[in-house]
Each structure stands twice: as C-alpha cells, then as structure tokens.
Amino acid sequence: MGRLVGLELHNFKSYKGTAKIGFGDASFTSIIGPNGAGKSNMMDAISFVLGVQSSQLRSHNLKDLIYRGRIEGDDARNDPQSLPPVKSAYVCAIYEKDTGETITLKRVVNANGSSDYLLNDKNVTALQYSMALRAESILVKARNFLVFQGDIENVAAQSAKDLSKLIETISGSADYAAEYDQLKEDSDRAHEVATQVFSRKRTLNSESKQYKEQMRERDLFESKLNEKYRLIKILHLYRIFHNQKRHYMLVADSRRISDNLGQLKESHSSHLAAQKANIANVANATLAHKKLESAKLEKAVAAESLRRAILPIASSKRSLESTIVSADAKISDLRSDGENLQDLRDSQQQQLAAAELQLAQFEKEVHESSERINIPPEGVAEYEALHNTFMANSGSSMLEKLTMLTTDKESLLSSLKNTTEHKNHAISRISELEADIRNNYQSSLSNINTRVHDLLGEKALKTNAKEDLAHKIKQSAFLELELTTKISQVSARLDELSSQQNESNKQKKLRDNVSMLRNLVKDGSIKGIMYELVRSSQQKYDNALQTALGKNFDSIVVESTAVAYKCIEMLKERRAGTATFIPLDSVVTDQINLNYLRSLDEGARPALDIVKYDDQSLERAVQFALGNTIIVDDLDLARELKWNSPHQINNKMVALDGSIIHTSGLMSGGQQTHKSGNALTWSKQEWSRLKREREELNDSLVKVQSEKPSAFVLNDISDEIRLIDEELPKLRSTVASLEREITERSHEVAFQKESIVDIERKEATTQTTLTKLDHELFELQKDITELQEKVYAEFCKKYNLESISEYEFFLGTAMRARARKRAELQRAISASKNRLSFQIDSIHDLEVRIHRLIASRSQFEQDLQKVSDLLVQETQKLQVLESEVKKIADEAETQKQMLNTLIKESKQLEDDIKEQKSEIKTLSEELTNSKDFLLKVDTERINMLKNCKIESVDLPLEDGFLESISFDDESQDVSEKAYSIHVDYGLLEMKLQDSFSPKVEAGLSVQLENVQRELEILTPNTKAIERLKEVDQRIKEFDREFTKARQDEKRSTAKFNEVKTLRTELFMEAFNHISDNIDKVYKELTKSTASPLGGSAYLTLEDEDEPYAAGIRYHAMPPMKRFRDMELLSGGEKTMAALSLLFAIHSYQPAPFFVLDEIDAALDNSNVDKIANYIKRHAGPGFQFIVISLKSSLFENSDALIGIYREQRENTSRTISLDLRNYSDQPQEIDVGQPEEPVSAST
C-alpha cells in the first residue's frame, strides 16, 4: 500500500505562510507540542486535505480555516511586518503509491468560503477527488483513516444503529441503500397492481358466463340452409374437378418416367459391359507399367552405383598424373645437382693434382740444393765471421725486421687461409642446403600441394554435387508440399461439393417426401417446410434468422398432431427417412414480453420482429421455433447484454454473422448458414474437373517422389566430403611444416651468403694488407740482399754459390720454414683428397636416387595406364546403363500415359454407371411415387363420390349414377371405377377451374362452416351477442394486462432480491471479518502480566435477515472484570474497546495510513504502553501511523517526531522534525537544531 510522504500548509489556521512537513519513510510518526501550539490545526489540515467536510471539523465555516493573524486592534498598524489580510489558504498532501508513483492532493479555501479540489495540480470535482482517494482505500465518509480528538470514546459508546451504519459505509453496502429502497417500493407497488387486475378479470369472466347462457337465436334459417347446400355442391365439384386434373397429369408423368427409365437401363447395360472390358485392360497396363518401373529403378540404381564408383578412379588418375609430373621435376632437379657435383669433383681433382705437383717441385728443389752445396768446416767458420760482420752492419736490425714482417705475413696468410676455408665451407653448405631444399623439401611440398589441390578440386566437385542434390531434394520437397497443398485444397473442394450434393439430395428428398405426404393426406393439412414458409424482413437478417431457427430450419409444419402421426407412419412404411413435424394444434409456446426485449438496446430486437410469413396460421409454429431469441448486431453487443447488462438476460442471442450465445452462456462461432434447396447447387462438370485435377496432381506427386534424389546418396557424399575435410588439415599441417623447414634453410642460405660477402670483404682487406707487406718485404729483402752481396760476395764466389741465401737455406731457420711448407702442402693434398672422396660419394648417391625415381616413375606410368583403361571401361558401362535407363523411362512414360488414359476412361465409366444407378433409382422411386399418387388420387375421387352419395349431395352428372358405386366391391380397377361416372362441371365458375388453391378451398370451407355455425346457433337476443363479444374483448385485454402485471411483479421482485442479496453479502462480509478480528485485537491490546489472555470483545446482530436495517451491539469485557454495558466502562476501558473496534475495522478496509489525535488522553501509562507496542508491532511499509500525543511513553516509541511550537513574535505555528531511528535507546543529548523559516519549515 501507499504512504503519506508529506504535507504543505499555506496560511492554514495558525500556520502563516507556507509550512512543509515531511514524514519520510517512517512508519510510526508522532506529532507533539504544547497546548495551543497548533497540533489540532495539523489534524484539521490532514482531515481537510483528505476530503473531510467542514461540518466534521472544528471550524464549520471554511473561511475560518484561513490564517487571520492578530486580532484587529492589537497594534497591527504598528507592526512593521504586518501584511495585507490573507484571502485564501490551502493544504497539499504528497501521497506515494506502492508502485513509486506520487500523487499530489491539494484542497484550497477561497475567500468566499468555497473549496477547490486539485489532483496532480489539475482541478477536479469533489466526487472525482473522493473517488481517487477511494481507489487508495481512503474512505472519506467512513473516515477509516483518522480519529479526531475526543471521538475515541464515542466510537465505543455509539448506538447499535450508528455502528451498523458505520459498517455499512465501510463494507460499501450503503451504496445500494437508495436502490434497495426504491426497488422494494416498486416490488410492493407491482404486487398491488397485479392483485387489482386479477380481481377485475374475475368480475368480467362472471359477466361473460351470464351472456353466453343467453345466446339462443335462429335467424334466416331457411336461406342459410339453401346456401349451405349450394356451397356443399360447389365445394365437391371443385375438389372432384381438380382431382381429375391431377389424375391426367400423373398419368402423363408416369408414362414419361417409364420411357426415360427404359432408355436409361439400356445405356446402363452397355456401360457395364464397357467397364468390364476396361478393367481387364487397366490390369494388364498396370502390370506392364510396374515391370518397366522396376526395371528402370534397377538400372538407375546400378548407374548411380557405377557413377559413384567412377569418382575414386578419376581421382586416382589425377593423383597418378600429378605424381608422374612431380617425379619428372624431381629427376630433372637431381640431374642438375649431379652436373654441379661433377663440376665440383673435376675442380677438386684439378686442385689435388696442382697441390701434388707443387709438393714434388718443392722436394725436387730441396734435393737439388742439398747435392750442389758442400762447404768444409773452415768455410763454416768463415761464414760465421762474415755473419757477425753482416749483423754488425745493420743486418741484425734488418733480419729482426724481416722476421717481424715474415711473421706478420704468415699470420695474414694463415688468416687468409682460414677465411678461404670458411668461404669454401659456406659455399658447400649453400649447395647442400639448396640441394636439400630442391630435392627433398620442395619436391615433397609440391607433391603435397598437388594432393591438396586435387582434394580441394574433388571437394568442390562433391560439394557442388551435394548442393545440387540438396537443391533437388529441397525443390522436390517444395514441389511435394505445393502439390500436397493443392491436392488438399482440391480434396476440400470435392468434400464441399460432396457435402453440397448430400445436402442437395437431403433437401430434395425432404421436398419429395413433403410432396408425397401432401398427395396422401388431406389437402391443406401439411403447410410446408419451415424455411420455405418464412423469410427475413431484411436481407441482412438472413443468416441470423437461419441460425436462430436452428434444428427447426427444415421442420415440417402440419395442421394437427394426428396429421403428424399419420405422416410419420407413412414415412416408416416407405422407409423414406426422417423428418421433424410441428403440429399447430398442440405446439406449446411461452408467453414473451416483446416490448421488454425491444427496450434492451437499439442494436437488439426479438427474432419474431425480423421474420415474415404470409399464412397467419403459422404464428404459433414460428413462435415455437424462435421463442424468445434476441437478434443483435454483433457479438460484442451480445456479450455486453449477457454479462454486463443490469438486466438478467437468459435468452439465446444470435449475431448477424451467425455467432450464438446460448442460454447456458456457451458461445459458438458465426457463419453457420443453412442453404435452402434453391440455393444449394452441385455442378457435375466442376466435380469431374476437380477429380481430374486431383488425379493429375497425384500423378505429378508420384513423379516428383520417384525423381526425388535419395537421402542416402546425399549422406554418402557428405561422408566423402567429411573424409576430405579430415585429411586436408593434416596435409595443410605438413605443408606448413615443410614451408617452415624451407624457410629456415632459405634463411640459413641467406645467412651463409651474407657470411661469404663478409668473408670476401675480409679477404680483400687481408689481401690489400698482404700486398703492402709483400712490398715492404721486397724492399727489405732487397736491402738485405745488397748488404749480403757486399759482405758475402767473396764467400759465395769462393764456394761457387749464387747467393748466401742458397747456403742459409739449409740452416735452422730455413729448415723449419721448409718443414712448415712441406706440412702445409701435405695437408692441402689430404684435404683435397677428402673433398674429392666426398664429391664422388655424393655423385654416387645422387645417381642411385635418380635410378630409383626413374623406376618409380615407370611404375606410376604403368599404374596410370591401368587406371585410365579402367576409367574408360567404367565410363562406357555407365553410358550404356544411362542409355538403357532413358530407353526404359521412355517406355515406362508411354505405358503410364496409356495407363492413365485407361484409368480415366475407367473412372469416367464408373462415374457414369454410378450416376446412372442413382438416376435409375430416382426414376424408379418417382415412378412408384407417381403410381402411388395416381392410386391415391383415384381413391380420393371414389371416396368423394361415395361421400356425395352418403351425404345425398345432388351432384350434376353427364353420365352414370352415384347409386352404381358400391361400398363393398374391391375387385374393380380403381381408375376404371373412378371414371365410370362423368361429372358435369357447368356450375363451377371458370376462375375456380383454372388452378387448385388451398386458400380457395379453405375459403369455400370457411363459407360453409360459417353457414353451418349460423344454422347451429340460435340467438334471439342479438344485443346479448354484441355484449358478449365486447366482454370477451375486454377479457383478452385484461389477460394481457394481467400477464404484464405478473411479469412486472416478477421482474421487480427479482431485481429487489438481487440488490438485497448483494447488499447483505457485502454487509455480512465486512461484519464477519470485523467480528472475527475484534476479539484478537482487544486481547492483544489488553493482555498483561496479570492477565496474559487479555479481555474479550464481540459483536452481535439485532436482525440477521436484514442486518443493515437494524443495529449491531458491541460488548467488551476488560481483563478480570465481569460483563457490563459499554456505558458503564471507564474512560480508559472505553478507549481500549474503541481502539480495538477501529483497528478491526481497519483490518477489513485498510487505509494506507492511520491518523490518531490524542487517543491516549484517558489512558494510564500502562495502557499507553500497550497502545504504543501495538502500533509499533503493526506499523510498517504497508501501514503508516501518525499519532498526535502529549504522553512521552507513546511518542518515545515512534520512528520519527514532528514537533510543533508557537512562534509568538510572528504569531504562527512552526514545526521541526527528528528521526529517532538514528539514535539508540540509551539516554543521550539530542540536538534538534534551530527552527527553520516559515517557508522552509521542517520537512
């Protein structure tokens, strides 16, 4: 439920300016303050804004609610803050619903004493304002949300009648009090009127009996008697004449029907013979077509299997071709690598030969030098002396420098050698890596890529094939659905035509039965079929009238019950089917108040008002068929009248579209139309066309189903695609791995090439440095040689030496140099031999691989030839099978067309035979009926002649005598016997001879009956007759008046009882709830330690039949006290009893908040604590308490305090607020702050 969030008071009573009071989310708020501060004015403000009338406030005049300030004369002129007199005031309440929506309730007092109501700042009426409060369970009249100061004891002490009125207001039953009184008065008045009308009717009945006893008179007896004889003669002549006309018509019809029947039977025999022959032809054609279809299916399955078998063969062929191409490429690469290796081998052989030659030359030089030089010991001593001289003449420094330069050169040569070896190793590694990439990885990568390409191509082919199959399957399914839908539509139309045919046959049979019965029973005794006798007053009512007639739509209306039984016996004897009869003499209809039904709504009218019929004697039958049915414009209006109308309507209601609401409340849909016999049509041509169309659609459906691809083929292709999808990731992973290996080796090749560039750059640098060093050595050697030539010239000449270097070649340093050079030459020879051996082995391995690849390629070519031959053979087989399938399919299609032609002929013959049978049966029945009618007509003629004889009618005759007719003779032919007497029709007028009419016959009969009545009635007192007619007319009028009075009495009594029941139920619902809860509330408020069970309280009714008309007694027994009347209780006891009653009432019709003004005035502290605890227990989000109190034991338990004090300087009331939930129960100092300005008072 909602809650009161806050108030805004503007110039209201003691509140000057605008004061705002906020209650926040506190469920228990206490308003406190000293006497005269304005607490009661706050209560008046709450009551005022919540719609309480001024008569219930302390100020009976609304102008008294406007703030007045100081009384005139109190030095107002000297007050600098004095303001002009206030002319208006208002109170605004902010109410928040439980949904969070906020409603602003505002009530304004004007200077003239009027009051305005505003809801969300919009002007509304007091009623709208009250209804808005009522929607939130705030009942202004019942005041279920507040208790004024001093009223609490009056609640308990109020009289029983006042308490009853309070509960009636709370329950809502008071809303029906005025209607209850008015209806009770109407019911009593209607009963009195009905009694008076009945009394007058009895008086008139007595007068009618008296006048009927005086009806004895006979007037103009003789003339009427002659008139009677004349009418009897004319009536018999009229009947016999038209009987004779029917006789000749029936004879002609019988001959015509007999001729048609003979021709039809001959045609039927020829059709039966043709059907027998056609059945044999259909059987033979069906067998031949099934054999061809079976052969076609067998060949198609074989072709499909072969087609699927060819796919892997073609794939194998493509794979072998790709493998051969890859092998050729690999062989070509290997041969190119072999040529490169041979070039390397030849180069290595040349390097080895050059190294060996260089070593041989070196050894040869050493040997020749050692044989040529032979120096004696004294020469060695001489050399030592010269050497010392050489060393002393700067030779030492030169040699030292030479040694250093030589060492540097050797170091450079060693570095250059290492660099060259690194370069050769890099070149070798590049060749190795490139060969590995080319021969191993690229070939494998090419093969796998070829395989991937083949698989992707194969997957694309299979995917296309799958999509084609799926498209064909989908298209076939769509065609199947489309054909099935069309077949269903055609079948539905055929069913509709069949239904129409059956309905047409039924209506035809019914009309035939009626015609037959009319010929067999008395003329005019059968009125006809209901739908032929009545019609709607307007075309828009056609459907509604047919629906309203319901099962009586095709009922047969007859004159009497005897005629109905006679017709039923005739139908049973002839087994002519069933029919419903409505006898006019015994049909029972209820009295219908048409005026009441016409007054319900402009769009509703009785069904009897929309029907028309020419024969007024049908009135009772029409009333029986339609009853009190109401015709309404649409179904919505029918629902409104049925369930929302103040009138209790139990009539059947029919909408213009045929929708029905039955008397039980069940509903059925519209468009339930019945067609009359003239409206029912059945087209044989359309029937045949639809049957042919359905057969063609069925053939197309069978063809589509037979041509629909098998789902198993689609599944097989899906499985093959799945296998390819499973293989492709593996191959792609291998490709990625090979590409990664190639990339890594390519990176290494690039690195080696970069290394070679660096090495060549270092070689060039070293070579430049070496060239410079050689130049320095050359210059130094030149200087050394010049010095040696000077020092050792004689020595060389003496021992025949070219130079001193030749001798020093065999000394220590030169020997070590020779040994190093020899070792270097030997190492170079060994390295060249190893490289040459490696190149030879590599060439051998490469040749082995080439031979293997050539052998494998040869095997691949052989396999390719085998696969190609197999593919050609299987393709040729497939072509043969496909041609056979096409040939068989053409034969099957031809055979099927022939079979369809035969089937159509067979069905056409079957339909013709069926139709002929039906026509033969119909003609046979017509012939039998015609003969029966003829016999009946002739029998009627004989009976009419016999009646003339019996009644001694002087019938004019041309030939024969009536006396010749025997009553017992049955041997003579009826027709011959009937026409042995020729009647003279000269007395019969021409207009009576033209055509037979039941109306004319009835008119003659009526004339005759009138004459007979006039003869039978003897009434000498003619005035008595007139008086009697007048009395009878008055009796009929009083009958209608009495019926209307009784209906008015029933209607008034029913309405009164309905309101009485509703008022009693509402009152008792509230009383029972309050009575059940009041004792619980009183016990909760009064229980204590001394009396843990508390007191007891209960309510008693003074009148249980009409409890609201009498009083309710309230009894309360405080704890541990005996029973006493409420008036004898103390003030505190009355207060507790009153609060129990108020809280019990509130539990039935709970308001979102409860405002209590000083209810604790007469209570001691103990009871105040009980009240405080009760409020605290029950206060919550759905129940807000606002209490004005002066007792701390009550307001200290509240959630929040609103303090009101008097600002004497400004002569106004002020408010402050405090939320006690923010403080503990322990004593502490609380700072409430300073009071705010008037416009922004505490919220």
Image (cartoon, helix red, strand yellow):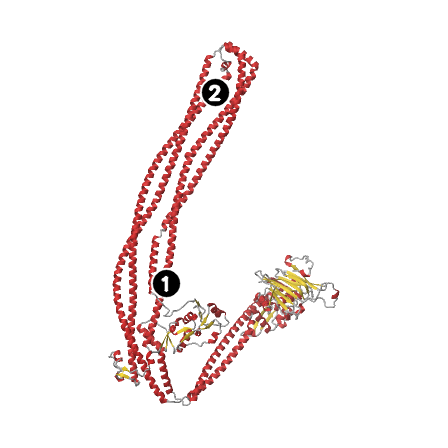
Residue 779's label in the rendered image is: none
Q: What is the distance, in whole Å, between disc 1 and disc 2 at their CAs?
A: 119 Å
Amino acid at pointer 1: Arg
Q: Provide the secondary structure element on which disc 1 rests.
A: helix
Q: Is residue 452 left or right of residue 1146?
A: left
Across and down, in percent, residue 1240 comes to 67, 60
Residue 712 appears in the rendering: yes
Quadrant assignment, res 7 = bottom right
- Which residue is at a point 52% across and 79% down the rendered structure image? 189
* Quadrant in which the N terminus appears: bottom right
Residue 493's label in the rendered image is: 1
Quadrant assignment, res 1204 = bottom right
Amino acid at pointer 2: Lys
Q: Is residue 305 left or right of residue 1162?
A: left
Foreground residue, 94 or 98? Answer: 94
Across and down, in percent, residue 300 comes to 32, 50
Residue underneath mark 2: 821
Figure label count: 2
